[in-house]
Image: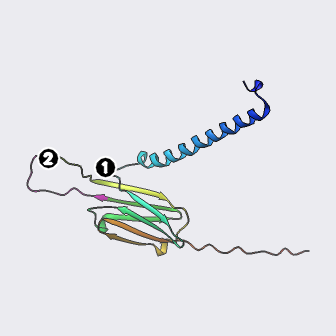
Amino acid sequence: MFGLLPWHRKKELTEQKEGFEDLFDRASSFLSSAVDPLLRWNGDWFPRIDVREGDKDIMVNVELPGLQPGDIDIRVDERRLTISGEKKMEKEEKRSDIHIFERRFGSFTRTVDLPVEVDADKVKAELVQGVLKIEMPKKKISARKSIPVKTA
């Protein structure tokens, strides 16, 4: 088919094909990043998480309703944040027929790759009304230094 088209038309079709390939690559990357955490889910529930980058820090908010600070473990290694914990089922003395039961209980682990390295010694975490707020200052990057070359 390409042999019957003028040269400039072949170029247009090639550019369109490359554009479509790029579009599919980006869509595939987006879908895999959205689905990947679900595939690694290892608990009965999956807390929602927001990660925002500011000029000097990384802010993370995690929805953890019903948890206490002692139920949560936070670890920071280089450019990776891991939050784990367990939401225990409430014990009820009086049993009745359950009509709807949508709340989730059990252990969870969320691992997030951070966009930059953070200073692990200065990380602050606070649990406010069921939302875990983590503030992680960015590690200071040393300025570039020019090294003079001497002649022998």
Q: Amino acid at mark 2?
A: Ile
Q: Residue shown at 84%/73% (left/top)?
A: 149
What x and y, as percent, mark residue 104?
A: 27, 52
Magenta part of the protein: which range? 86-98
First in residue order: circle 2 vs circle 1: 1
Which residue is at 46% across, 62% downward?
Answer: 51
Rendering coords of residue 71 (x, y %):
30, 64
Helix, strand or loop under label 1: loop
Q: Is residue 148 above or below residue 108?
A: below
> Eyeballing the image, is 60 above or below 1?
below
Asked whether, in this view, residue 100 is left or right of residue 105, the answer is left
Q: Residue furthest right?
A: 152
Secondary structure beneath disc 2?
loop
The residue to which callout 1 is attached is 44
* The C terminus - image quarter: bottom right
Q: Is residue 39 above or below residue 152?
A: above
Give the residue number, with chain letter if any, for mark 2: 98
Q: Is 53 in front, or is 140?
A: 53
Residue 97 magenta-highlighted: yes
Which residue is found at the position 78% from the left and 30% from the top? Answer: 6
Q: Amino acid at mark 1?
A: Asp
87 or 10, which lies in front?
A: 10
